[in-house]
């Protein structure tokens, strides 16, 4: 470790010396500030800045203080802050209980209710062997599991729902399921499943509970059951400041400050074999302490700027790692008029400029016809080589603004081997390179200040929902903040299967082929069942109307 640190210091000074002639005193001050910002935001004490956590609280307090010191005015709903609710799935409420023969069973160790349980209470004396009206039924999953052990398309959870629905139709007041097959069923409470509640409670009994209570199916069991499944929520906060120049138009600058925490939300890329032991903090120095630090330093520069033809709003978003929660909330509940927004600049992962290639990807090039002349003028700047991407859609917060017909730009220095891993630390940031990006954006603002309000232009979109997990895509942007049953559509790509099937923004996809899509997770699982060239149908709701369209991948 010490050898590595010494080598890093040598490389840092080599980098500084190679551009020493280009660095002014103010640039060196900025680099020092960037180091301080990222060192704090990516420190272990912030525990990875997971949205809604205490680490996020420490980060937002730091950002608010920096905004204030930079001379910004608060522009949130509550001072600097704009709180928003993060739907985190479902949870088993603490009031849930199960007694058998006056002994309370232990949740998860001996039983668990499925997420699609209704809120219900019952008391009954019942024999597991009997299936009579007005009492709970018991069902061994052995046969259905064994019959489908070689079926890759078999969905045990859906099979249980079907069994429960039929039992309810025949008068069962609850369904207890268990597995005596010896084949692992991998069933557990799935808080990400947004299925609607069934008519009766459905409870899984573990092998431990079965051994004690179901050894004699003819015995009578005294049952007392209460099931309460509730929403699991936490609160994130955007941090918003403004430089009010009294102008009619406003430029929005954004960067998300949240990261992965300990990887609790399942978005860590830490290899499983290494991640199976002690929890590790994901500090997110590049993703996105770098963009947040750039946001703070850019605010300082523009506060001193003589360009007054636009107001400047600076937003540190939270909840980006969960699906653009913060930026979507802002664009749905803006603290300024979105009609006044000239354009939006997003900085996400701007801390790893390669000293050899010096390439920065700039997304959103096609979102305004003005960008061509702007970047032509900026080509004289020799800070780095720009690689342009025309799309207004991308995996970061500018997408929320593009979907509101606002021109956007997205600055990004590229994916690296530390992305979404605990190794994304402050000692790997190219601070000089990041300073050049900030100066470049300042120059861009200077040019656009004479152009008035930029025209918006819709761009040709990439496949928005395909990752390495899938061979196909519908071509939608899911609304990650939607907490209802199904997948609500936030955007539709031109010419892709969803558009051809008639799907529009705001529709809710509930079924793909024979697969229910009650949640984003089940939607992704359904996509994984198809290959290019496959044909199927998609069912979706528009308001209260149910629709169906044909899909060819």
Image (cartoon, rainbow, N blue to C red):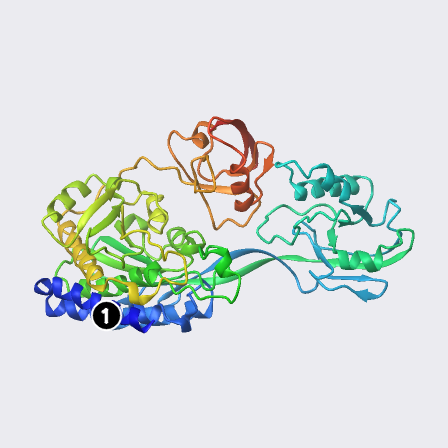
Q: Write down the quadrant of residue 123 in the picture.
A: bottom right
Apparent side of residue 290 relative to residue 32 in the rendered image (left or right):
right
Q: Where is residue 280 in the image (x, y as percent from the top left)?
A: 46, 66
Apparent side of residue 445 relative to residue 36 in the rendered image (left or right):
left
Q: Position of residue 189 (x, y in %)?
A: 64, 54
Q: Where is residue 91 in the image (x, y as percent from the top left)?
A: 62, 58
Query: In the rendered view, would you say 449 is above or below 552?
Result: below
Residue closer to the observer: 34 or 305: 34
On the question of residue 543 being in view, the answer is no
On the question of residue 250 being in view, the answer is yes
Q: Which residue occupies 91% across, 55% down?
A: 219
Query: In the rendered view, would you say 8 is above or below 470?
Result: below
The residue that label 1 is drawn on is 9
For mark 1, give the secondary structure. Answer: helix
Query: In the rendered view, would you say 317 is above or below 474?
Result: below
Residue closer to the observer: 286 or 474: 286
Residue closer to the observer: 418 or 306: 418
Apparent side of residue 262 relative to residue 405 in the rendered image (left or right):
right
Q: Residue furthest left?
A: 21
Residue closer to the observer: 216 or 535: 216
Q: Which residue occupies 70% across, 40% down?
A: 159
Q: Which residue occupies 61% across, 37% down?
A: 152
Query: In the rendered view, would you say 301 is above or below 138?
Result: below
Q: Which residue lies furthest to the front in this view?
A: 3
Q: Position of residue 471 (x, y in %)?
A: 46, 35
Q: Write down the quadrant of residue 100 in the picture.
A: bottom right
């Amino acid at each position: 470790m010490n050898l590595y640190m010494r080598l890093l210091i040598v490389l840092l000074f080599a980098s500084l010396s190679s551009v020493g002639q280009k660095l002014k005193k103010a640039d060196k001050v900025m680099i020092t500030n960037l180091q301080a910002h990222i060192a704090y935001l990516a420190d272990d004490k912030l525990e990875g800045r997971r949205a809604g956590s205490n680490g996020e609280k420490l980060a937002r307090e730091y950002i608010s203080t920096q905004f204030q010191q930079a001379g910004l005015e608060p522009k949130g709903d509550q001072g600097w802050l704009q709180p928003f609710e993060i739907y985190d799935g479902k949870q088993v409420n603490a009031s849930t209980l199960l007694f058998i023969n006056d002994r309370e069973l232990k949740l998860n160790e001996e039983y668990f209710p499925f997420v699609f349980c209704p809120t219900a209470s019952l008391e009954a004396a019942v024999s597991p062997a009997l299936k009579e009206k007005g009492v709970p039924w018991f069902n061994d999953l052995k046969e259905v599991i064994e019959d489908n052990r070689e079926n890759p398309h078999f969905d045990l959870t859906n099979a249980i729902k079907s069994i429960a629905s039929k039992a309810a139709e025949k008068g069962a007041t609850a369904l207890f399921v268990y597995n005596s097959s010896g084949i692992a069923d991998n069933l557990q409470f799935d808080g990400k499943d947004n299925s609607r509640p069934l008519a009766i409670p459905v409870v899984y009994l573990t092998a431990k509970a079965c051994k004690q209570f179901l050894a004699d199916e003819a015995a009578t069991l005294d049952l007392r059951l209460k099931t309460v499944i509730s929403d699991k929520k936490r609160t994130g906060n955007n941090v918003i400041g403004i430089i009010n120049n009294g102008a009619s138009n406003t430029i929005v600058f954004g960067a998300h400050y949240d990261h992965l925490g300990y990887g609790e939300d399942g978005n860590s890329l830490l290899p499983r074999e290494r991640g199976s032991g002690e929890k590790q903090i994901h500090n997110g120095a590049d993703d996105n302490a770098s963009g947040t630090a750039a946001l703070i330093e850019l605010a300082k520069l523009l506060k001193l700027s003589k360009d007054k033809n636009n107001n400047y709003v600076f937003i540190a978003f939270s909840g980006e790692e969960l699906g653009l929660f913060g930026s979507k909330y802002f664009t749905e509940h803006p603290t300024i008029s979105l009609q006044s927004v000239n354009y939006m600049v997003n900085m996400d992962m701007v801390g790893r400029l390669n000293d050899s290639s010096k390439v920065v990807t700039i997304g959103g090039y096609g979102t305004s016809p003005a960008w061509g002349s702007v970047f032509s003028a900026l080509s004289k700047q020799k800070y780095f080589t720009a690689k342009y991407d025309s799309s207004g859609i991308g995996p970061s917060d500018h997408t929320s603004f593009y979907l509101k017909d606002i021109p956007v730009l997205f600055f990004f220095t590229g994916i690296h081997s530390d992305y979404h891993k605990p190794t994304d630390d402050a000692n790997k940031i190219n601070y000089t390179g990041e300073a050049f990006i900030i100066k470049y954006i300042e120059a861009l603002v200077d040019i656009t200040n004479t152009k008035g309000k930029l025209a918006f232009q819709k761009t040709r979109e990439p496949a928005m929902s395909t990752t390495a997990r899938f061979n196909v895509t519908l071509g939608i942007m899911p609304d990650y903040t939607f907490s209802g049953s199904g997948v609500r559509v936030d955007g539709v790509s031109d010419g892709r299967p969803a558009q051809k099937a008639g799907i529009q923004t705001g529709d809710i996809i509930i079924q793909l082929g024979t697969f229910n899509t009650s949640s984003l997770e089940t939607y992704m699982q359904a996509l994984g069942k198809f290959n290019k060239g496959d044909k199927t149908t998609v069912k979706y709701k528009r308001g209260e109307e149910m629709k169906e369209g044909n899909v060819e991948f």
